[in-house]
Image (cartoon, helix red, strand yellow):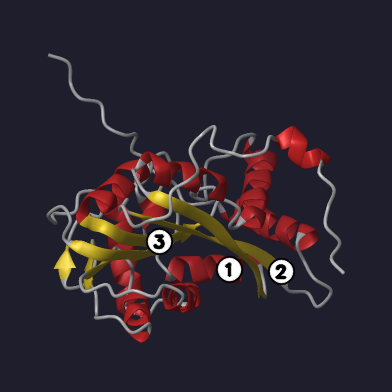
Amino acid sequence: MSETVGPPKIFDRVLQRGRLARAMMKGAPDFLMARAADDLRDRLLTVKREFPRSLDLGSPGAHFAQAVVSSGRAPPLRASGCGGAVIIDEEAPPFAPNCFHLIVSGMALQWANDLPGVLAQARRMLAPDGLFIACLVGGASLIELRFALAQAEEEITGGASPRVSPFVDVRDMGALLQRAGFALPVADVDSFTLRYESMLALMGDLRAMGAANVLVKRARKPLRRDIVARAAQIYAERFCDADGRVRASFEIVWASGWVPHESQQKPAQRGSAMMSLEDAMKAPRQSDA
């Protein structure tokens, strides 16, 4: 009998949970979560319906739960691998089908080894016409740090190991939502730049947030000091502003979708158009005056 092959293990989730738990106990910097929570509140305020039962899936801290409450809804059940009312594995949540009307998740699912599976589980747990909203760290985050570390390690050792985790691309999220069975899928991105005194200050923030490298195939030896020093030099040379501070790019990818319901808007059926594209292109435009 052949063994069932599961998704590839990209992240060491046990290590990630341990680091995140220690970081939160020490008061991890929360500026990314605070920004995302403000965005979540604004998004929920545009939705004119109640969500009697909701779930905060995996979000570190209480930022997302508070955003749900501040949007006028009941407090969600907080469930994650390191904190919250219920300790769970986000990739295998123990909840019954159709038991929530809203599921939110903030800055947690980028560590999932099986993101399509997590989305499918969220779809399963939502009742018809239920809403899923999540944000993840995006693929263009920390591109400067990736470049500097890879360049320095290549120069000094002749090869580079993965030092920064790969993250999801916004262009993939819509397809993943559709694959999981969500209707009206939407994916968008919040891109912004933060500035630091140096690359070392940036890396210090990442460690303090519990966001250091947790790749399964990461190098087991810590970065050599000469590599770190050269990477900091490259970073300063390539990504420095006139005042001496360096830039760090961040992306927060947002994904939302609804569980199908008969009340939702349906796309027009193929062949139902009254005018062909060719005729539409030939039609004269009406004056705006």
Measured in 3D between alpha carbons, the distance from the residue under mark 2 to the one under mark 1, in whole angstroms, is 9 Å
Give the image location of residue 156, x and y in percent: 66, 42
**In the orientation shown, which residue stands out farthest toward the top?**
1
- Sequence-wise, the earlier of marks 1 and 3 is 3
Q: Are marks 2 and 1 in contact (CB under 8 Å)?
A: yes
Residue 202 circle label: 1
Residue at 41 percent of width and 47 percent of height: 177
Q: Is residue 30 visible?
A: yes
**In the orientation shown, which residue stands out farthest toward the front?**
274
Give the image location of residue 99, x and y in percent: 16, 60
Query: Label 1 amino acid?
Result: Leu
Where the C terminus falls, by quadrant?
Answer: bottom right
Read off the residue under disc 2.
246
Residue at 43 percent of width and 54 percent of height: 265
Give the image location of residue 166, x and y in percent: 50, 46
Q: Is residue 121 left or right of residue 173?
A: left
- Sequence-wise, the earlier of marks 2 and 1 is 1
48 to 154, vertically: above or below = below
Secondary structure beneath label 2 = strand
Q: Is residue 207 left or right of residue 27?
A: right
Read off the residue under disc 3.
134
123 to 54, vertically: above or below = above
Q: Is residue 106 left or right of residue 172?
A: left
Query: Label 2 amino acid?
Result: Val
User: In terms of depth relative to the viewer, which is nearer, 282 or 132?
Assistant: 282
Q: Is residue 220 visible?
A: no
User: In terms of depth relative to the viewer, which is nearer, 125 or 221?
Assistant: 125
User: In terms of depth relative to the viewer, which is nearer, 14 or 134?
Assistant: 134
Query: Label 3 amino acid?
Result: Ala
Callout 1 crowding tier (Cα within 10 Å): few <14, some 14–19, many ≥20: some
Callout 3 crowding tier (Cα within 10 Å): few <14, some 14–19, many ≥20: many
Measured in 3D between alpha carbons, the distance from the residue under mark 3 to the one under mark 2, in whole angstroms, is 29 Å
